[in-house]
Amino acid sequence: MKCQNCDCENSDGARFCKKCGASLTDSNDKNKINNRIIIVLIAVVVIVLAGVLLYASGVFNSNTSLEAGDFEGFDLDVPVGSNFVLKKSHNSNPDNLFVQYNNNGEHSEIVAFQVGNNLSEDKVTSLGEFVEASGDLRIYRNGSDNDGFYMVFKEGVDANIIIYGGDLDILKAMADSFKCHNFSVIYDEPEASQSTPETSEVSSTHEVSGSGALSIISGSISTGSGLSDKTHARVFVGTAHSGEHVKIQVFYSRDGEDLNKGNIVDKTVDSNGYIEVASAKAFKYYPDHAEINIYDKNMGLLDYLDVGLKPESGTQTF
């Protein structure tokens, strides 16, 4: 054993140096401690590198891998195994183009997404509370951790997107992939021979849901003659849905300016198949536009209707 103090060679069992008298035991213990520290550091580096390689290989995120979806007018990556089917399409008004896709495949925690050129963040703020901003994404939450869901909003060039679901990591990845540069291709220009609605009616864009699903069939919007009168919406969904519990939301606007915040109200379809809801307060101006949304008890969108109104008092049907 070599003395660390004077380099004199001593026997292996010696405790002190035969030349200078320095302790040989302390030097040996220090060497052992240093060796152990080096071994631990090497082990940590190996573990970190292994974790990085596993993450890069997709072992930890194999269930959230995305692939390019097949959509008209925009690009969006979706989870592998999901099956997004067109549920709603409003494409007869170039200023209010809108589509909704529902997920009928795997990854049911990603419920649906909506893309529209008149789809604003106000729609999300009316459904939930703001959580955070992540880059150009705006994230909201509806309900508690046990029964709620996330909503991620992102602006595009020609249209904006809202994605609904429970897995925030997948929602963010999908929203980050969203690119919309030619959404106007979904516009379906009406034929010139189409007639103009009578004065007692209003124009609307609407696609009826599949057979058996609750959908907006017809209805009316009524406004009083005084500034203290509330605005009433009466929406017909069919007697087959009498007694069903739903949530309804109606946005009113005038010349592009919001007149209300679109509160979500719990309602029961009456025996005649109608849902009736009054505005929370009277408006300063008569509305010229109404957006009606009907949700199920879990806030899944059942149907959507965009209605153009004449800014005057009375009852207007759609």
Image (cartoon, helix red, strand yellow):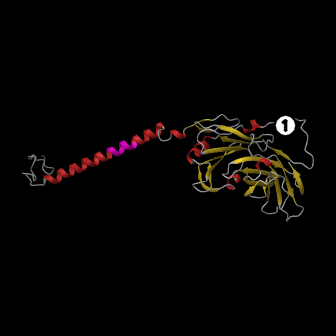
Q: Is residue 286 above or below residue 50?
A: below
The image shows residue 36 at horizontal and vertical percentages of 26, 48
Packing grade of label 1 (10 A; few <14, some 14-19, many >=20) is few
The image shows residue 80 at horizontal and vertical percentages of 57, 36
Q: Is residue 312 visible?
A: no
The image shows residue 157 at horizontal and vertical percentages of 69, 42
In this view, the residue in front, 282 or 180, is: 282
Q: Residue at x 74, y 50 (%)?
A: 294
SS for tag 1?
A: loop
Which kind of residue does numbered mark 1 sit on?
A: Pro
Which image quarter: residue 71? top right
Residue reaching furthest to the right? 199
The image shows residue 235 at horizontal and vertical percentages of 81, 51
Left or right side of 247 for 27: left
Q: Residue at x 65, y 38 (%)?
A: 84
Q: Main secondary structure of the magenta part?
A: helix
Identify the magenta region: 42-48
Residue reaching furthest to the bottom? 228
Task: Please name the residue that numbered disc 1 is placed on.
Answer: 190
